[in-house]
Structure formats: C-alpha cells, structure tokens
Image (tube, rainbow, N blue to C red):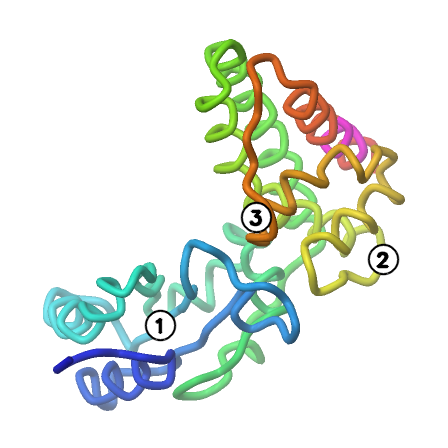
Amino acid sequence: MAGMITSVEDLATRVSAGLGARLVCFLVYGSAARPGAPGSSTGVNTVLIADGVDQRLLDELAAAVAPWVRAGNPPPIVFSESEWQSSADAFAIEYEDMRAAYRLVAGRDPWPVVTVQREDVQRQLEHELMGKLVRLRQGYVGAQGDGRRLTALVAASASGFLTMLRTTLRLAGTPVPASPAEVVLAAAAVIGFPASDLADVVANFEGRARLALEPRDPRAVAYLEAVAKTADYVNRS
C-alpha cells in the first residue's frame, strides 16, 4: 500500500524528510523500547523535538505521520527544543520513565541537557497518585454495579498506575524490572500490597488474558486498595 509505514524507523525517515534540519530528535519510548517486554495494546509511543513549533511544522508533521496513526499508533508528542530543556520540573515522572526506556531513532540524544530533580518527581507522584485514587473511587461508585463499565475503568487506568509503580521503585532506590508483572511484584514487596491482587489486571495489560470483572468484583476493590496503599507509601516517604 502506498504510503504504508511498517516500523518506527520508516516513520523517522518520513518525518526527517518532511522536517529536514528542523528536526532535533526523534525517539521511541515505553514498552516498545524495553527489551523483552510485551508491547502495549495502545501502539508505539514516540517523541519529536524540533527547533521550534509553528503551523508549518505541524502541517508537515501531520502529513508525515498520517499512515502511522491509521495503523493504530498515537501521533508523536511534540516539543520545541527550548520547551524540552525547561520542562523537567513539570514532567518529572514522564521524563524519568521515558529516559529509563527509550531508543533514539533520529537526531541527537536529548538527555544530556536535562536534569530531573528528585523533589520534583516526589511532588508530582504524590499529586498524580492522589488524583488517580480519587478519580478511581468516583468511577467505582458509578460503575460498581456494571461489570463492563467496571472492567473499562480499571483497564484504562492500568498503564498510568504501572508508570507510578515504576517511579515509586526508583524513589525507593529499588531496581525497576522490565515487564509489568515483575514491576508489580517488586512494588508489592516495597509498598506492602499483595501482588496477586493485580495479577488479572496485569495479564490484561500484557495481552495474556482478557479482564472481565463482575459487578462489585473484589478484584476491583483490591486494585483500588493497591492504589491507596501506594499513595500512602509515597506520602510517607
């Protein structure tokens, strides 16, 4: 098929051709960059850094990535070079998680100019965890009697919670495993919740088994409790 993009390298070639010298960096991050880890069902995540961001660049980028998006992948996250260098405090969790699993595909390595402060990670993690916990409880109140809605609520939150568990392990000085299942095992040992409580959620995230919760399913209650215990652990750290 004309215009088909079959790999992130194909995408980088297309983006580089479209942007030329304006391209500073193009990288893939997350599960697709973790050796041996299962891929996410939400596609391959990428970041593009350019010399600046204006309508002309966005138009060129939109044309370049259109086949990539049609294939089910999210479009790249876009930063200007100055935004990238000045945003480590605002996106401390995301930067640390991205740096832990990334692959440079085009341009120059963007990390030497970025320093993430521990206190920024801690502050953002506390905020994100409490926000997630409150939203999950709110959603649970509305969905607890409907298994399909309850399943969707829990499944949709799993990726973000796994990122927070990885961040919690880093703050605790504990090595962060590659696979989601191993992350949960390590985090459960540090934080103090039963890893088995998240087994079905992780199996669904990894694509090994489909999650199907029943109304008022105890697995959903246990998942909320794991989030609550993680928030409490981080707040006390």
Residue 39 screen position, x and y as percent: 53, 63
Query: Spatial distance from mark 2 to mark 3, Cα to Cα?
Result: 23 Å
Query: Magenta part of the protein: which range?
Result: 229-233
Hey, what amino acid is under mark 3?
Phe
Hey, what amino acid is under mark 2?
Thr
- The answer to whether mark 2 and mark 1 are in CB contact below 8 A is no
Residue named by callout 3: 205
Q: Label 1: state its secondary structure.
A: strand
Whether 213 is drawn above or below 71: the answer is above
**Does the magenta run of residues contain 34?**
no
Residue 193 screen position, x and y as percent: 83, 33
Closer to the N terminus: mark 1 or mark 3? 1
Crowd class of label 2 (few under 14; some 14 to 19; many from 20; radius 10 Å): some
Residue 192 screen position, x and y as percent: 87, 35
Residue named by callout 2: 174
Q: Could you tell me which residue is drawn at 74 percent across and 30 percent down?
A: 226
Name the residue nearer the viewer: 168 or 75: 75
